[in-house]
Amino acid sequence: MKLSIIIVSYNVKDLLKQAIDSLFVASATIDTEFFVVDNASKDGTVDFVKQAYPTINLIANTKNLGFSVANNQALSRAKGEYVLVINPDTITQPNTLLKAIDFLDSHADAGSLGVRILDGNGKFLPESKRGLPTPWVSFCKLSGLYRLFPKSKMFNRYYMGWVNEFKTQEVAVLTGAFMLLRKNVLEKIGLFDEHFFMYGEDVDLSYRLTLAGYKNYYFPEVYITHFKGQSTHKLSVRYIKSFYGSMFIFAKKYFLKF
């Protein structure tokens, strides 16, 4: 099997339908298996998937286990040469998967690949390509310095602001909204770190890939649309705790010794 597609869902039934339908089109000529892992949604997602998509492998959790654990549930069962981890609030263009897979097929050094990501208004999302959040990089991000110097290699390493959005390039970190991964590499380095409930797990996995000698590629020849923030409101206490807490977990794991 060439590709395993994994979507973790939480209370986004209507957007999930868009995501699945677009992925069915994009993978029509690829030997593919689908997984939807639902984290105890209250909007009828489980029944909807059972009825509308009977061929999908559905994992229905009875409580919200978080992004890492839910993805790992499917990753442990995935049989594809490549695994696509993708958010439910996305729309994948028809040629995205074919071109992305072709790139990985011809770049043996690649452990993962991300694509150009646009928001619902067609605006480029800078998290499509990111740098490693070292203490200095994290300070520039949290303090807002990166906004003052958006093209600076010193102050905006978080979003790698000096890298053209249309240039294919090796990057430090890819976003979990779309990560195309080699399954045999995951078997070597391990799956998502389950200490990360939501946010940060993509940073950690990207970093472990590079530590193992593989490259993360930003591949902007194709794109997806990401209606970001649907599962977590950006100004909520939950978001603040999850996002900034994950940055602390990452820093403590790799950079802070105490």
Image (tube, rainbow, N blue to C red):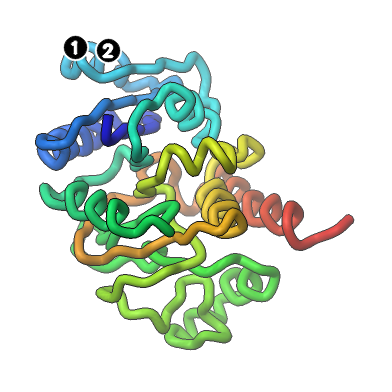
**Number of disc labels:** 2
* Residue 213: image location, x then y, percent: 56, 58
- Foreground: 121 or 224? 224
Which residue is tagged 2?
Answer: 47
Residue located 39% across and 23% down the image: 38
Crowding around mark 2 (Cα neighbors within 10 Å: few <14, some 14 to 19, many 20+) is few
Residue located 60% across and 69% down the image: 142
Which residue is tagged 1?
Answer: 51
In the displayed structure, 133 sits above or below 69; it is: below
In the displayed structure, 165 sits above or below 127; it is: below
Q: Is residue 152 visible?
A: yes
**Tag 1, which secondary structure?**
helix
Q: Are marks 1 and 2 in contact (CB under 8 Å)?
A: yes
- Foreground: 176 or 181? 181
Residue located 41% across and 66% down the image: 129
**Tag 2, which secondary structure?**
helix
Crowding around mark 1 (Cα neighbors within 10 Å: few <14, some 14 to 19, many 20+) is few
